[in-house]
């Protein structure tokens, strides 16, 4: 699998995060989350999105969903805000 460096693909990472939120929670939530996501570095945005998803889909499912993004973009686990 090809892994994209996080620093060069910040917007691609954020787009994938928002897509995941839209699919899991809804487009209205993703639209509201966009401002926060755009103002954060990718690593923080994905950690925060994981915590948001936990509230709606549960820890196991959120972790599994975000794990795919972390692997795709070579992001390590960072603390949520």
Image (spheres, rainbow, N blue to C red):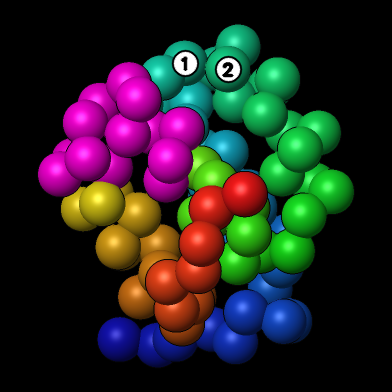
Q: Judge whether residue 72 can be spotted in this image.
A: no
- Residue 57, image x, y percentages: 25, 26
Q: Quadrant of the N terminus?
A: bottom left
Q: Is residue 51 above or below residue 5?
A: above
Q: Is residue 53 magenta?
A: yes
Instruction: Give the side of residue 5 with respect to residue 9, left or right.
Output: left
Mark number for residue 26? 1
Q: Is residue 58 magenta?
A: yes
- Tag 1's secondary structure? loop
Q: Quadrant of residue 77?
A: bottom left
- Tag 2's secondary structure? helix
- Residue 33, image x, y percentages: 67, 29
Q: Is residue 28 above or below residue 16?
A: above
Outermost residue, top side: 28
Residue under the image location 54 percent in, 53 percent down: 80
Tags 2 and 1 in contact by the CB under 8 Å rule? yes
Instruction: Give the side of residue 10 with respect to residue 15, left or right.
Output: right
The 10 Å Cα crowd at callout 1, few under 14, some 14 to 19, many 20 or more, is few
- Camera-side residue of 28 and 61: 61
Rounded to the nearest whole Å, what is the CA distance between mark 2 and mark 1? 6 Å
The 10 Å Cα crowd at callout 2, few under 14, some 14 to 19, many 20 or more, is few
Residue under the image location 38 percent in, 33 percent down: 53
Q: Which residues are magenta?
A: 50-62
Residue under the image location 60 percent in, 67 percent down: 43
Q: Judge whether residue 28 can be spotted in this image.
A: yes
The residue wearing badge 2 is 29
Residue under the image location 73 percent in, 81 percent down: 8
Mark number for residue 73? none
- Residue 75, image x, y percentages: 48, 77
Q: Quadrant of residue 5?
A: bottom right
- Residue 62, image x, y percentages: 28, 42
Instruction: Provide the major secondary structure of the magenta segment.
Output: helix
């Amino acid at each position: 699998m090809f892994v994209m460096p996080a620093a060069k693909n910040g917007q691609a990472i954020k787009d994938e995060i928002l897509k995941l939120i839209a699919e899991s929670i809804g487009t209205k939530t993703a639209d509201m989350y966009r401002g926060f996501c755009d103002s954060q570095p990718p690593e923080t945005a994905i950690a925060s999105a994981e915590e948001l998803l936990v509230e709606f889909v549960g820890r196991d499912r959120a972790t599994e969903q975000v794990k795919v993004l972390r692997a795709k973009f070579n992001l390590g686990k960072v603390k949520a805000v």
